[in-house]
Image: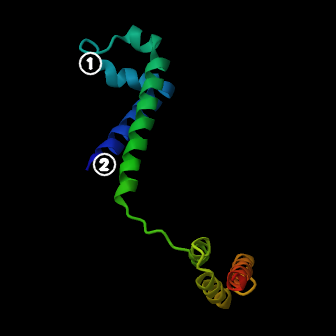
Amino acid sequence: MESAVKIIVGIILLLVSLAYLYRPVLVLRVNAWGRMLLFNDAHLLHYRRRWGLLAFLAAVLFLYSGFLNLSQLVSVDPVRDPIEAGYLSFYEKRFDVAAEIAVQYLKDHPRDPHAEFLFRQARAASQRLKQKP
């Protein structure tokens, strides 16, 4: 709910800022009913760029914040790459597991350079580990 309100406020401020920057006549027409309460035409025309830029920056802030809130609501499960799991096993010194993961990956993706590298490194590290007394 909070993100929807922020997005709506951001869109409204974006439209207001664009009206201030590119259609001051439209702003004057809309502003006619509130001249005595909120705005002075001389002030509006004299400071239109300042107010337009301020409204634009506020719009960007509200839109960013709203979409940031929306992105946190959407749960995205990261896709775990098997090669990443193989490298993790390699760095944890489980060389046989890393080699097995690389072999399984090479069955599905033959000639993959990352899997070949992981397999060679894991096999060599495993052999060195076995040769140590």
Q: Which mark is residue 4?
A: 2
Q: Which mark is residue 114?
A: none
Label 2 CA crowd tier, 10 Å (few <14, some 14–19, many 20+): some
Image location (x, y in percent) of residue 37: 23, 14
Residue 57, quarter of picture: top left
Provide the residue designation for mark 1.
34
Label 1 CA crowd tier, 10 Å (few <14, some 14–19, many 20+): few
Residue kind at label 1, given as amino acid type: Gly
Marked residue nearer the N-terminal end (1 or 2): 2
Of the two numbered discs 1 and 2 in the rendering, the one whose residue sits closer to the viewer: 2
The answer to whether 37 is drawn above or below residue 86 in the figure is above
Which residue is outermost to the front?
Answer: 133
Image location (x, y in percent) of residue 27: 39, 24
Image location (x, y in percent) of residue 98: 61, 81
Residue 127, quarter of picture: bottom right
Which SS class for mark 1? helix
